[in-house]
Amino acid sequence: MADETQNLSRRDMMRIGATGVAATGVAVAGVGSLPVHAAEQASGKLPTRRYGRTGLEIGWLIGASDWSKELVPRAVAAGVNYWHKAQAWNKDSIPAVLKRQPRESYYLECVVDRVNGDHTRGKIDEEQHYQFVKHRLKESGVGYYDVFKFHFDYHSIEEAKSNPGMVRAFERLKKEGLVKHLAISQHHYNSIGGDMAWEIMHYLADNRPYEATQFFYTYGDRKEVQEWIEVAKKKDIGTIAMKTMGGVGRASHDAKFQKLLADPRYKDSTPAAAMVKWLKSNDNLTAAVIATKNFDQFRENAGAAVLAMTPKDHEMLALLAGYNKGLTCLLCAQCVSACPEHIGVTDIFRYERYARDYRDLDRARKEYAALTRNGTSCVGCGECLPSCIQEIDIPAKLRDVHNLLG
């Protein structure tokens, strides 16, 4: 079958992924869930939401430049219209399905990293960022990028106050018509004496021209993240959740967990579908980035995105939360503040996700090898343990991850 013919049909879009159970009529709404908009169900297309003050109406699932060439046409047909890290595409690699469409019908995001080092050691350099975007535009031939996104973000509020280089690079490019909107992908930097992501984003909302944000967010996350999403909505700032599927990947490969799923109470739901529906149930959240390796994963996620949560989905998430307890880091970074060795525990456990959830061991090992302080820096003092909402034995897990990635 040709790449562009196996698209998602309306029936596919109304299906809860791997369960194979089609929704009919109006989906059953579970306790505390939100109703599905009739237009979304009727069209079988991904819902769209306004991306804050950018004014862009973007599909609820975010596409990515590393998706397979077979998947992209099907995603476009399903309603994906925003493409993360589009600067990776050149004239030869940009998908043909996009090149055939009017340029204004889809949105390309260019992420701009620090230079001369990684995200903790690299620098902000206005001229290099400006030239990077111009070079990528020349290589890609797309004309302009809809969103200029500062990737790996500010280390602290103080840096955001004192270093305007990234904003100035954006303003120069915008003046030339080469970019349109400014966004940021914010991480925590308490491991290097910086601030937490939500602290920095609150500052930016009132003091810098960022129109949209991207950040870690998953089921069971800290209240501060939820509070930021609510504040961002009130201030008309777009919000994209990343690292959303905490524990879903490893649970799908765990034989014991799969046996639990045989219980009839979990029929008609899956961990991935339940997580997608939970994320989507937050009307204040614009969209989500979900790692997607193949068409089956996309079909499950896209199908769930047009459905409301059911009681069975709530039970599924409770089961997943129980599985994650003591095992899966939610990347909240609270433990890092308590570590006397200043180990970037969140980064280490994020790389573990690449290996165990995304099944990308090569990437995980490459990222881990670049750390200046890895799991072997842990002295086993246990100062981090009281802060872990997941009740993880962090020293033991650091040793385990080092054995996997070191």
Image (cartoon, rainbow, N blue to C red):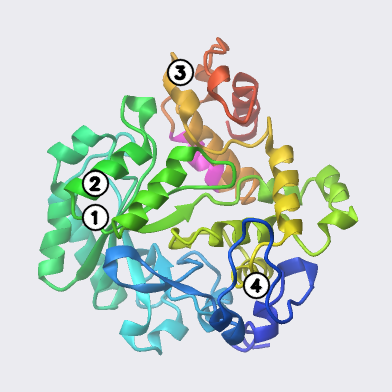
> Between marks 2 and 1, how big is the CA–CA gap?
7 Å
Foreground of the two, 67 or 20: 20
> Measured from the top left, where is residue 400 in percent x and y?
66, 27
Circles 2 and 1: CB distance less than 8 Å?
Answer: yes
Marks 4 and 1, the one that precedes in the sequence: 1
> Between marks 4 and 1, how big is the CA–CA gap?
32 Å
In this rendering, position of residue 136 left or right of residue 239: left
Location of residue 332 with respect to 233 vertically, above or below: above
> Measured from the top left, where is residue 89 in percent x and y?
38, 70
| Type of amino acid under label 2 | Leu
**Residue for badge 2:** 204
In this rendering, position of residue 131 left or right of residue 107: left
Query: Regarding mark 4 in the picture, which secondary structure is present there?
Result: helix
Marks 2 and 3, the one that precedes in the sequence: 2
| Residue range highlighted in magenta | 363-370
**Residue for badge 3:** 338
**Residue for badge 4:** 303
| Type of amino acid under label 4 | Gly
Within 10 angstroms of label 4, few (less than 14), some, or many (20 or more) residues?
many
Q: Quadrant of the C terminus?
A: top right
Location of residue 10 with respect to 346 vertically, above or below: below
Marks 2 and 4, the one that precedes in the sequence: 2
Where on the picture, by quarter, is residue 257? top right
**Residue for badge 1:** 210
Circles 4 and 3: CB distance less than 8 Å?
Answer: no
| Type of amino acid under label 1 | Tyr
Q: Quadrant of the N terminus?
A: bottom right
Query: Regarding mark 1 in the picture, which secondary structure is present there?
Result: loop
Marks 2 and 1, the one that precedes in the sequence: 2
Circles 3 and 1: CB distance less than 8 Å?
Answer: no
Q: Is residue 367 magenta?
A: yes
